[in-house]
Every structure is written in C-alpha cells, then in structure tokens.
Image: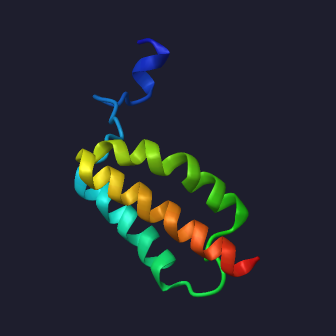
Amino acid sequence: MSQLDLFPQSSQAVSPVPSVDDVRARFEDLLSRLRLATSDLPLTERELAYWRVVTPQMANWLPQAERDAVCAEFAGHVSRLSKVAA
C-alpha cells in the first residue's frame, strides 16, 4: 500500500465558474449599497480598490448591454459619492 492510498483523493476538482445569475446577484448587492448611500461611500478604500478592478472583469460574464450598464452605474455612483464626500 502506498502512502497516497491512506488519504482519500477527491474525484474531481471543482472549478469556481460563476453563473450569470450569481454575477447579477453580486452586482445587485453592490449597486444597491451604492444607490442607498447619500453622503459617504459605503465601501472602505480597500473594497473600492477591489471593486474597481473586479467590476469590469466580472461584468464580462453578462451580456454586452447589461455589462456596459453595470459598469456605467458603478462608475456613476462612485463619482457621485466621491464628489459629495470631498
């Protein structure tokens, strides 16, 4: 018996491929937080940096028109809240 036989091996590696519905749900959570904000950005600097990188990448899972709308809405809210906070 080899040492590998002593430990169970996973039969298959699961790839975390998101569904379009998962992507929409994550964006809806993010955008609803931004929509409700009136004076301060509801994200930390670290979260904002993360979402600035992730939004255009994650939006690629959506149809083009929806992708463009999500990215534009995100940028608009960040711009609006940044001006209010300044």
26 relative to 45 in the view: left or right: left
* Along the viewing direction, whichever of 26 and 31 lies nearer the viewer: 31
16 relative to 44 in the view: left or right: left
Residue 74: percent from left, percent from top = 47, 63
20 relative to 44 in the view: left or right: left
- Residue 71, by quadrant, is bottom left
Q: Which residue is most to the right?
A: 86
Reply above or below: 2 against 70: above
* Along the viewing direction, whichever of 8 and 31 lies nearer the viewer: 31
How many marks can you see? 0
- Residue 23, by quadrant, is bottom left
Residue 34: percent from left, percent from top = 50, 75
16 relative to 30 in the view: left or right: left
Residue 40: percent from left, percent from top = 66, 81
Q: Which residue is most to the top?
A: 2
**Residue at x 41% of width, y 71% of height:** 29
**Residue at x 42% of width, y 65% of height:** 73
**Residue at x 23% of width, y 47% of height:** 63
* Along the viewing direction, whichever of 45 and 39 lies nearer the viewer: 39
Assign the N terminus to one quadrant of the image.
top left
* Along the viewing direction, whichever of 32 and 18 lies nearer the viewer: 32
**Residue at x 32% of width, y 65% of height:** 25
Q: Identify the image's colour scheme: rainbow, by chain, secondary structure or one colour.
A: rainbow
Assign the C terminus to one quadrant of the image.
bottom right
Reply above or below: 75 against 38: above
Residue 54: percent from left, percent from top = 51, 48
- Residue 47, by quadrant, is bottom right
